[in-house]
Image (tube, rainbow, N blue to C red):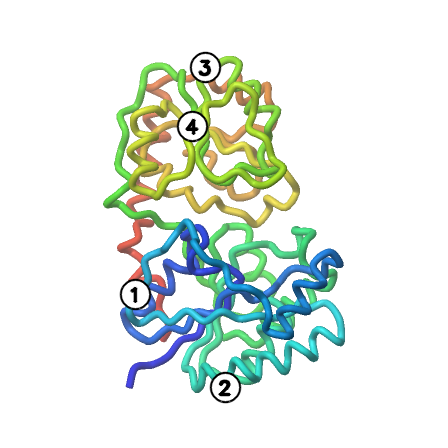
Amino acid sequence: MNEKCVMISGVGWNDNFQRHQKFANFISDDCDVIYLQGVVASGFKFDKIFGYVNKILGTKKKETNKRISNEKNANVKVVSVFTLPSTNFIFRNINKILVKKYAKKVGKVDYLINYLPIDTSTEFVKELKPRKVIYDCVRNFSAWPQYPNDIDKQEDKFTKLCDEVWVDSFYLKNKFTNGYNIPVKQILPTYDERIFQKIPVKDKIENFVYYGLVSNKLDIPLLTKIAKKYNLYIAGPIEKGCELPEGAHYLGCFEQKELFEKVSEIADAFIIPYVGKNMEGVIPAKTTELMAMGLPVYISSFYDSRELSDIFYVYNSHDEIFNYIYSYSPEEFKTRSNKGLSFSEENKDTMLKSKVTLS
């Protein structure tokens, strides 16, 4: 009989493909994986109260006609889980009942990997009693306003149950190394080398590309300035209520292979204009694939971008990014590009077999 691993996530399997689904597929080469999707980690929102009631009663309608259908290995079983925000005594006790129900369905497990440091996850550990608990932390939860007010306490309680902590960012590595006497493993973002290849470097920068979610976490005023002076192309989903920068060319949404084909035809450089205090603890998922493509990357200043400032052009202001662009030299960039290519070589998807290990 195969060993069994349960993974607790708020990310649906057919949401944008990321670390959660990628790791599940890799782990399933060696054991059966039960992927619990849809666990609620956010704080209570009054305008969603009817949705919470529907979850309790089991009357929530299932989504249909999803746009994305992510690849799933045969040994991965996806289970939809409905829980309530871990914010108060009543909800936590309801969640205990719900967790018992799901734990019976899951049965005996050997490993548990968790992405959500909340009391609901702690209850899963108590009920399932895995022999090894891993917290794969990809966010500095306390910096994000949508989580429960006591998320720090909930995270601390869960972390103390863990045998190992995995992280993606340099910030989180320092946080857990300094804060806990638990083994910490940094697994940086990886990329599919069959898709993302080196793009010839241009002598002059005229065409910028941003790809990813278009949201209020982007510096839209900066992108508008870029679009006035250069050609700016944007690819990716647009968050409700967010408008494209004036003058930008919107390409639409693409799967990874088509995305690379598009940007390799257009891009002279990439831009990552993130804003907000909650960037501390974030390392962009596209970090190593950008390095692999070998073009200049202009990125706003935050903890992890500064760790990579010998590869990326890290700016602190609008004036500074334009100074970088105006003074761009292909010869100077060659040193950065070579460092980035070497870095990306160590972080391909194929390297995950030696990094994502359970025993």
Circle 2 residues within 10 Å: few <14, some 14–19, many ≥20: few
Residue hosting label 2: 104
Mark 1 to mark 3 CA distance (whole Å): 48 Å
Residue hosting label 1: 73
Q: Quadrant of the C terminus?
A: bottom left
Q: Which mark is residue 205?
A: none
Q: Earlier in the sequence, mark 1 or mark 3?
A: 1
Q: Amino acid at mark 2?
A: Lys
Mark 4 to mark 2 CA distance (whole Å): 48 Å
Q: Position of residue 223 (x, y in %)?
A: 55, 24
Q: Which mark is residue 209?
A: 4
Whether label 1 touches label 3, CB < 8 Å = no
Mark 3 to mark 2 CA distance (whole Å): 62 Å
Mark 4 element type: strand
Placement of 166 over or under 193, stated as above or below: below
Placement of 64 over or under 311, stated as above or below: below
Residue hosting label 3: 327
Q: Residue furthest left?
A: 194
